[in-house]
Amino acid sequence: QVQLAESGGGLVQAGGSLRLSCAASGRTFSSYTMGWFRQAPGREREFVAAISWSGGRTRYSDSVKGRFTISRDNANTVYLQMNSLKPEDTAVYYCAVAHTVVVVTTVTGFDSWGQGTQVTVSS
């Protein structure tokens, strides 16, 4: 299994920025999708962003499009740059891996998950 470790969460004021990182270790493959999900208290875990193995294709939820940017590097690390943060972005953010070359945007499509990192946006 792939081990994922998120970092970069914290408290930020509305309108501010935060950069999340997710480092993958263990059995990693070059051809897989990496994504970010988030879950707020009392809410279902929801898709935020995903990126293909090559980084050539990305997908975003409508709620974060234009504000968040997902990227990955050659060190098996995926990033989520979050700008113009809103209080409604407050949630635990999870990194995930899907073993497919097709970009996946559903929770059930991902195989491995990190433990999550808390992002809190104050109003």
Image: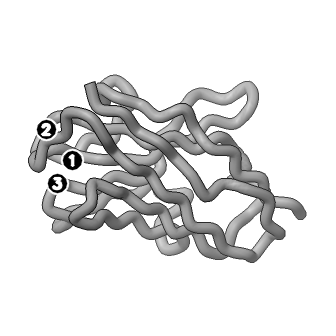
Residue 16, x across and y down, in percent: 73, 75
Judged by depth in the image, the label closer to the viewer, 3 or 1, is 3
Residue at which label 1 appears: 103
Confirm whether residue 40 shows in the render: yes
Q: Are marks 3 and 1 in contact (CB under 8 Å)?
A: no
Q: Residue at x 27, y 54 (%)?
A: 76
Q: Residue at x 66, y 54 (%)?
A: 9
Considering the numbered disc 1 on the image, is that residue within a helix, a strand or a loop? loop
The Cα–Cα distance between marks 3 and 1, rounded to whole angstroms, is 9 Å
Considering the numbered disc 3 on the image, is that residue within a helix, a strand or a loop? loop
In the picture shown, does residue 28 fall above or below 21?
above
Nearest the viewer among 89 and 119 is: 119
Residue 107, x across and y down, in percent: 39, 29
Indicate left or right for 75 with 13 as reference: left
Residue at which label 2 appears: 100
The Cα–Cα distance between marks 1 and 2, rounded to whole angstroms, is 7 Å
Considering the numbered disc 2 on the image, is that residue within a helix, a strand or a loop? loop
* Mark identifier at residue 123: none
Residue type, mark 1 in image: Val
Q: Residue at x 47, y 34 (%)?
A: 114
Quadrant where the N terminus is found in the figure: top left
Mark 3 vs 2, N-terminal side: 3
Indicate left or right for 43 with 75 as reference: right
Indicate left or right for 27 with 105 as reference: left
Residue type, mark 3 in image: Trp
Residue 42, x across and y down, in percent: 73, 25
Residue at which label 3 appears: 53
Q: Are marks 1 and 2 in contact (CB under 8 Å)?
A: no
